[in-house]
Amino acid sequence: MTAPAAPRLSLGPIPYYWPKERVDEFYAMAADSSADIVYLGETICAKRSQVRFEDWLAIAERLQAAGKEVVLSTLALLEAESELKRLRAICAQDDYLVEANDLGAVQLLRGRPFAVGHSVNVYNHRTLALLAEDGCKRWVLPVELTREALAEMQRLRPVGVETEVFAYGRLPLAYSARCFTARARELPKDDCRDACIAHPDGMVVETQDDNRFLALNGIQTQSARSMNLLPALEELRGLGVDILRISPQSEGTGEVIDIFRRVLNGELTPAASAELLAALMPTGPCDGYWHGAAGMDALAAA
């Protein structure tokens, strides 16, 4: 029997607010990396304006010239007509596949090939089948679902639809109309003064007993710990997962990509990679959701 093919590697969109110079440096690294697919665009807050739509297209062109598959990602929560205008522009271009992160984008993309991000709640095969009818060619497993849920989805997924799994990075847990970062600085959301740019990996929240369990990233709530599913690589292969997603962090993303590639190439065991990856994480590892436990648990490490 032929062994399952190794998944491809994707680099998710930057979830944080970084200066344009840092963004340009990051994607120069991505162009030289072994990532197969690169997602681009602002997915959290339209007020993060240092990188404009035209700048994203220029970065996309450079990455495509470097041999990467480029996907343009949309906002997960839209609240203003200006944000809808940008969404329409992203969905109207036909040079790159679009990752829809809300159902408004799905509606605009209907009838064309598109991807669906983890912020769209695809919890069963019937939802995936409806999206496939609209043109969905790739979906990302919602981060809170288990390996058993994925197995059921894979058994019944429509023909021609790729499955991508969020395999590394701080988990995107929730989105809100309120900006938590501005609130922490006692600023109104409409006059946030680019508060997020001072926190290149978000603001970590601690309990009274010093348990670092969440990170606040503008309107987004993340896990403080970083998901690491590389120890589950053989399970992921056996389930027919097509793509493993690495979510960017401010430091060490290039090293994370390299470790994933070495494991996929058989140069490093998944178990041996765990310690290397843990040393690169801002807070530490987690994988509880995959195992049906509390999301912040690190069961592979245990």
Image (cartoon, rainbow, N blue to C red):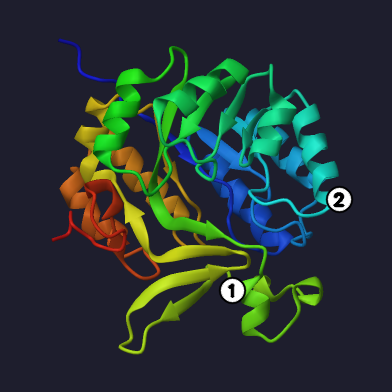
For this orientation, the residue located farthest to the bottom is 208
Badge 2 marks a residue whose secondary structure is helix
Eyeballing the image, is 164 above or below 76? above
| Inter-mark Cα distance, 1 to 2 | 25 Å
The amino acid type, in three-letter code, at marker 2 is: Ser
- Where in the figure is residue 50, as x and y percent of width and height? 78, 60
Q: Residues within 10 Å of mark 2 (few under 14, many from 20)?
A: few
Position of residue 287 relative to residue 266, above or below, is below
Mark 1 vs mark 2: which is more N-terminal? Answer: 2
Structural crowding at the residue carrying mark 1, measured as other residues with C-alpha within 10 Å and reported as few (<14), some (14–19) or many (≥20): some
Could you tell me if residue 7 is visible in this image?
yes
What residue sits 31% from the left and 58% below the top? 295
- Between marks 1 and 2 in the image, the one whose residue lies nearer the viewer: 2
Give how far across and how far down residue 38 sits, in percent: 56, 38
Mark 2 = which residue? 82
Marking on residue 23:
none
- In this rendering, the answer to whether 212 lies above or below 289 is below
Q: Position of residue 195 (x, y in %)?
A: 69, 76
Of helix, strand and loop, which one carries label 1?
Answer: loop
> What is the three-letter code of the residue carrying label 1?
His
Q: Quadrant of the N terminus?
A: top left
Residue at 68 percent of width and 77 percent of height: 182
The single residue placed furthest to the front in the displayed view is 126
Residue 179 location, quadrant: bottom right
Q: Residue drawn at (59%, 74%), measured in percent from left and top? A: 199
Task: Indicate which disc residue 199 carries.
Answer: 1
Q: Nearer the viewer, residue 245 or 31?
A: 245
In the shown orientation, is residue 190 left or right of residue 132?
right
Q: Is residue 34 visible?
A: no
Compare residues 23 and 3 and report the one nearer the observer: 3
